[in-house]
Image: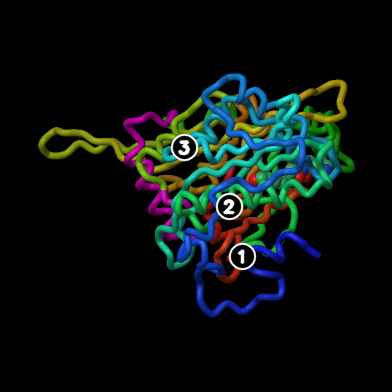
Amino acid sequence: QHRFWSSQPVPQYNETCVTCDGPIDERPRLDPASVPEAPYPLLAGFSWCELDISAESDIQELYELLRSNYVEDDDAQFRFDYSPAFLRWALSPPGWKRVWHVGVRVSTSSKLVAFIAAVPVTMRLRDVKALAVVEVNFLCIHKRLRHKRLAPVLIREITRRAHRQGIYQAVYTAGTLLPRPLVTCRYWHRSLDARKLIECGFSRLRPRMTMKLTERLYALPEKPLHPDVMPLERRHCASARALLSQYLETHTKFHPCFSETEFEHWFLPRDDVIYSFVRVQRNTSATGTSNERVTDLISFYSLPSSVIHSSKHRTLRAAYSFYNVATSCSFQDLMQDALILAKNAGFDVFNALHLMENREVFDQLKFAPGDGELHYYVYNWRTSVLRCEENGLVML
Ligand code: JJ1
């Protein structure tokens, strides 16, 4: 079935009973000399390269490779269109390494035809509180080179490069089923511009519904329910990070552990990339000093999709729920503010996965289940499957 994955240290479909959590293959860690020093051999006519994400030209080449060849929905109507600024943000968190931005070029023309990336992250997985892993993302092979079995070569090469840096586990997600998901989460969608979603084939007019009624069904207040929600600033970050860490530790079993600098990187707002908002409580002590405590956090990222066949609309502007924590109000009221803020920022749809506590608010807030699912995988780690609600990782 899986010529490649059956050779890899991942749980197979038939392994159900897990007695002890831990690595599947200890050899690369115990015997680093067994990790090759040189890159894996590539198909004749192609060469490895490292992209320089600080160079406008390399980011632009990566942007174009992904825009034309990356993930599509099941019916090939939409394709992810990550912006250059988004890619730079996603690929440069604290501790990022250029050796982990791996490209494949045609040797004669230098054209970029494939890519895979890893970034470092510290994860908690069940009882293991700080597992050093890489998040692998943006694996993309040009459409004309599919069926040449390049993906296994890229995966072996990024694995080798992680091993060379002393990292032996990876987390990755895919819309396709591979051996074997840690957890599988469905996408849910909340219309913000119902007319546009229908016009571009993202959703359909329901039976016995007119366009006017549909627009009225999805109407939202003009302003957030909480007038004091404000964009996250650097001064909020220590408190916002404490709020999020506390939430993830108590409510989930699989989550990133953000350092202070990582939190600032992943959450400080960037136009058309990452949107974060907080509510703060001001406390004035007896001595007159005042401090601010973040009580609530809203965040979502911008990931447009190209509309593949529409004369009317070229792109769909989608906001994807990132990390949201409510303590001063209900989670539902907080997420309603997330919808309003996303609508006011010009997004057409708000997408969220069935993970953490999200499912509890989908019905009331008029989300509908999508036709896509996201499978989460951990490379070289054995553990039993999680419930969706126990999943505290949102990847980009
Ligand atoms: O966006 C997705 N589906 C949409 C569009 C479907 C178009 C036909 N296939 C969808 N729409 C219906 C819901 C509608 C929303 C508004 C209100 C009424 C109901 O279902 C799906 C997710 O559902 N997206 C994808 O399939 C894209 C790929 C997802 C896998 C991502 C893999 C990432 C890998 C790297 O990390």
Distance from disc 3 to disc 1, alpha carbons, whole Å, reads: 27 Å
Q: Secondary structure at mark 2?
A: helix
Q: Is residue 391 left or right of residue 61?
A: left
The structure residue drawn at horizontal position 37% and vertical position 45%, both measured from the top left corner, is 259
Q: Are marks 3 and 1 in contact (CB under 8 Å)?
A: no
Q: Decide which of 9, 320 is in the foreground and name it.
A: 9
Q: Residues within 10 Å of mark 2 (few under 14, many from 20)?
A: many
Relative to 160, is 7 above or below? below
For the residue marked with disc 1, what is the amino acid? Answer: Pro
Q: Which stretch did the figure color magenta?
A: 230-257
The answer for how far apart the CA atoms under marks 1 and 2 are is 11 Å
- Where's the C terminus, which quadrant? top right
Label 1 environment density (alpha carbons within 10 Å; few <14, some 14–19, many ≥20): some
Residue at numbered disc 3? 93
Q: Earlier in the sequence, mark 3 or mark 2?
A: 3
Q: Are marks 1 and 2 in contact (CB under 8 Å)?
A: no
Q: Which mark is residue 159?
A: 2
Horizontal relation, residue 236 to residue 379: left or right: left
The x, y position of residue 133, in whole percent, is 49, 53
Residue at the disc numbered 1: 9
Q: Residue 218 lies in magenta, yes or no?
A: no
- The percent position of residue 199, horizontal first and vertical second, equals 84, 29
Q: Does the stretch in magenta take in 252?
A: yes
Q: In this orientation, does residue 60 appear? A: yes
Front of the two marks 3 and 2 = 2
